[in-house]
Image (tube, grey):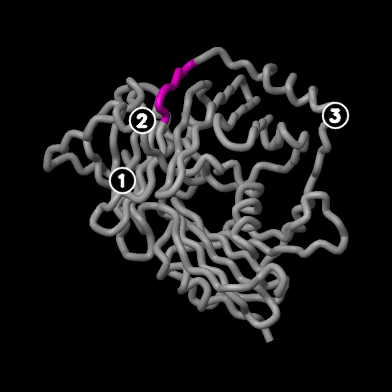
Amino acid sequence: MRRADVVRWAAAASLGCLGLALAGPAVAQAAAPAAPAASAAAPMADARAWLQRVNDAARLRSYEGTLVSSDARSMTVWRVAHYADGGQQAERIDALGGEPLTVLRYNDVVHKVWLRTRVAEVEQRDARARFPALPAAGAEQQVFEWYEWQPKGAARVAGHEAEVVLLKARDAARFSQRLWAERGSGLLLRVDILGPGDQLLEWAAFSDILIGVRPRVTAVTDQLRRLDGYRVLRPAVLPTSLDNEGWQLQSPPPGFRPVQCAKRSLDLAGAPAAPVVLQAIYSDGLTHVSLFIEPFDAKRHQAEVAGSIGATHTLMGRRDDHWVTVMGDVPMETLKRFASALQKKR
């Protein structure tokens, strides 16, 4: 799979195209966290409650703000509006640079609207956590098996008081993450991804945000009704498993469990002759690794690749008659262990 295909497929599979990184304007908005007292270690019940509060805020609060995301090579700015009204949720995300793109979500249905080409891609929302949410419900215990909870005091982000927590990786198979949650609501305002020696690899943050705005769900649903003249694509995503497709993962890196597996055409229109990619997603409760498997094509698949952009590492190569891509916000050695563990069943 070409990197452009990987990026497009990963973006299509998740609304997490916002990334977990930030540089630039928001830096000035966030003061360094105060060092906590030596006795500040929180009981695990408090830690679980804190994570649950963050997820509840991402789901149940209505907010509007500007999110700036960056990796080592690029920066992107998004305007984000999230509305919750009773049991209904709606979201609008506008890219403020690059190719004009608007992402609209009503409950679990996502529309990615490409304004220049007048194409709308429609999909079901996937199960992975997205900024400003954290792990899926019930994953808190898994998180604390592989990350140490370390409160780090308070700071300000985008003019709001925030509680700062470090989830310190317990081994070298994953990166640490530093989280900044608004004190009053629990809404996640910033995430840092930290490499060895607490090296800052990526970070994402709101540079401005209003929390508790009027939930304008109908403003999103009304726009969904105004797609006349757009070519609407509904790519088929077929749930499956590695085992059903003739693959197995023997001894994956510790802590990573399967959360999703599906097949989908690389042609968004679903042309019958288009190549099909198999994606299996594994999670340790906080971060994810994706395995992509597709038929080898000498025209599209050439040099093997091992590289990184910020915290995101990618490993691509040929496996007999297939092309395998492994990518995620984890160290390269973790991806190599996934690639070595992936075997074709005999």
Q: Residue at x 42, y 29 (%)?
A: 206
**First reached walking from the N terminus: tag 2 or tag 3:** 2
Instruction: State which mark lies toward you, 2 or 1.
Output: 2
Q: Secondary structure at mark 3?
A: loop
Query: Would you place residue 251 above or below residue 64 in this image?
Result: below
Mark 2 near mark 3, Cβ–Cβ under 8 Å? no
> CA gap, disc 3 to disc 1?
53 Å
Q: Residue at x 50, y 23 (%)?
A: 61
> CA gap, disc 2 to disc 1?
31 Å
Q: Quadrant of residue 291?
A: bottom right
Q: Secondary structure at mark 1?
A: helix
Residue 47 in the image: x percent, y percent? 33, 42
Q: Residue at x 24, y 40 (%)?
A: 151
Q: Which residue is mark 1?
A: 44
Q: Name the chief secondary structure element in magenta.
A: strand
- Residue 246 is one of the magenta-drawn residues: no
Type of residue at label 1?
Met
Asked whether 25 or 45 is in front, the reply is: 25
Please give the range of residues in magenta.
206-212
Q: What numbered label is drawn on residue 229?
A: 3
Label 1 crowd (10 A; few <14 / some 14-19 / many >=20)? few
> CA gap, disc 2 to disc 3?
38 Å
Mark 2 near mark 1, Cβ–Cβ under 8 Å? no
